[in-house]
Amino acid sequence: EPGPHDVLFGIGNTHLHIGNNIFLGIISATRREYPKADVINRPAVCVRVVQEIRVRYGGRFLEKCNDDDSTRSWYEVEDGCILEKVGAALEQEERPLGATERKEQEGGVGQMTT
């Protein structure tokens, strides 16, 4: 079962999970650094994001199993896949917060201090 600092991959309301908000905060803080890194050093930027989630927050990267039963079982995503997703997140342009996300930040839910 996911903990509060875990990052959830997949479709659904993952943006409501505290761990995903922490992850997006780290991505936002790191986004300017990524394009400045040369191709050889970009993976190191991604590794630092992953390590911050794992070491600083004790979080994991999880994805829901695609099985036919209705149990909510999760598995840890492999590092190669995590690094690809982190790199893709760093390459995306920052999008404005939606109404739900703004409300969460105003209430302090999932808010991260940097």
Image: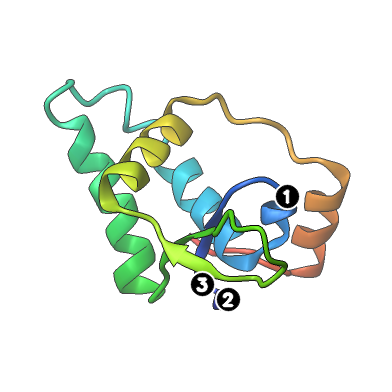
**Residue at the disc numbered 1:** 12
SS for dot 2: loop
Q: Toward which corner of the image does residue 94 lie, by quadrant? A: top right
Kindly identify which residue carries mark 2.
4
Query: Does residue 15 sit above or below 33 in this rendering?
Result: below
Q: What secondary structure is found at the residue carrying circle 3? A: loop
Task: State which mark lies toward you, 3 or 1.
Answer: 1
Residues at circles 3 and 2 in contact by the CB criterion of under 8 Å: yes
**Residue appearing at x 66%, y 64% in the figure:** 17
Looking at the image, do the residues carrying marks 1 and 2 touch, with CB atoms under 8 Å apart?
no
Seen from this angle, which residue lies furthest front?
68
The local crowd at label 3, few if under 14, some if 14 to 19, many if 20 or more residues have their Cα within 10 Å, is many
Distance from Cα at disc 3 to Cα at disc 1: 17 Å
Residue 9 image offset from top left, x and y in percent:
54, 51
Residue occupied by mark 3: 5
Relative side of 43 to 114, left or right: left
Q: Which mark is residue 76?
A: none
Secondary structure category for the residue under label 1? loop
Separation of residues labelled 3 and 2 (CA atoms): 4 Å
Front-most of 99 and 15? 15
Q: Which sits in the foreground, 80 or 36? A: 80
Q: Position of residue 74 (x, y in %)?
A: 52, 67
